[in-house]
Image (tube, rainbow, N blue to C red):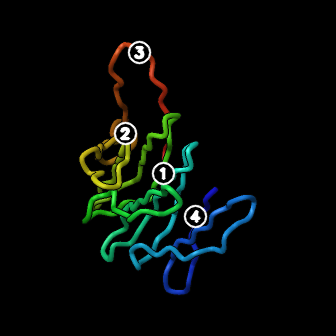
Amino acid sequence: MIAVWERNEGLRWNLRTARNTSGSWSAPAAWTVSGLDQQQPDLKADRAGAALTLWQADDGLNDRVQAVRYNNGAWGIGSYLSAAGQNAQTPRLALDRYGVATVAWASQSGATSIIQSLRGVDTDSPAARLINISTRGWVGIGDSVMIGGFVIGGNTPHKVLIRAI
């Protein structure tokens, strides 16, 4: 079992991690990947003990989503999932029954906000699968209200989880 959490260490928010083996927790270890603020960690593990964790990380200019894998008793090298030059916040992680990860976050560039998602997250080359799953636009009132939606294609039933942020 693995735990990851955020801790305020004076001027910075950093991540800490600990591992439980045979009913005993290891001492918490500092886990500073970027050297800047790291917050809102989310961790999921599969049945084999491999894990993926992601968090909101300050890159010096913007908040971005960063992730790292845990395999064979060791953490890999973290990488950014979200694009540079825009803020990415509130990252969330889910694993399906096969251990395939899906990540979603709110992204903002100027006054425009969207929800972005990655499926089958591979921290080596995630950008190829980045999709926008929301609409860019101003939300008005009355006749100017914006109604978001999506279409699912195909002839077979699909399970869908929708979360509003």
What is the residue that sits farthest to the top in this orientation? 155
Q: Which residue is under mark 3?
A: 156
Q: Is 157 positioned to the left or the right of 73 in the image?
A: left
Q: Is 54 positioned to the left or the right of 27 in the image?
A: left
State the mark number for residue 10.
Answer: none
User: Could you say where residue 151 lies in the image, as x and y percent from the top left?
Assistant: 34, 26
Q: Nearer the viewer, residue 23 or 31?
A: 23
How many neighbours does mark 2 have within 10 angstroms: few (below 14), some (14-19), or many (20 or more)?
Answer: few
Q: Amino acid at mark 4?
A: Val
**Relative to residue 117, is residue 42 depicted above or below?**
below
Q: Upstream in the sequence, badge 2 or badge 1?
A: 1
Q: Which residue is under mark 2?
A: 145
What is the residue that sits farthest to the right in this orientation? 23
How many neighbours does mark 4 have within 10 angstroms: few (below 14), some (14-19), or many (20 or more)?
Answer: many
Q: Which one is closest to the eye, mark 2 or mark 4?
A: 4
Residue 138 visible here: yes
**Mark 3 secondary-structure assignment:** loop
Whether label 2 touches label 1, CB < 8 Å: no
Q: Which one is closest to the eye, mark 4 or mark 3?
A: 4
State the mark number for residue 92.
Answer: 1
What is the residue that sits farthest to the bottom in this orientation? 10
Picture residue at 67% right of the left edge, 61% below the top: 20
Q: Upstream in the sequence, badge 4 or badge 3?
A: 4
Q: Quadrant of the N terminus?
A: bottom right
Q: CA distance from mark 2 to mark 1?
A: 27 Å
Q: How many callouts does the rendering have?
A: 4
Picture residue at 37% right of the left edge, 47% below the top: 121
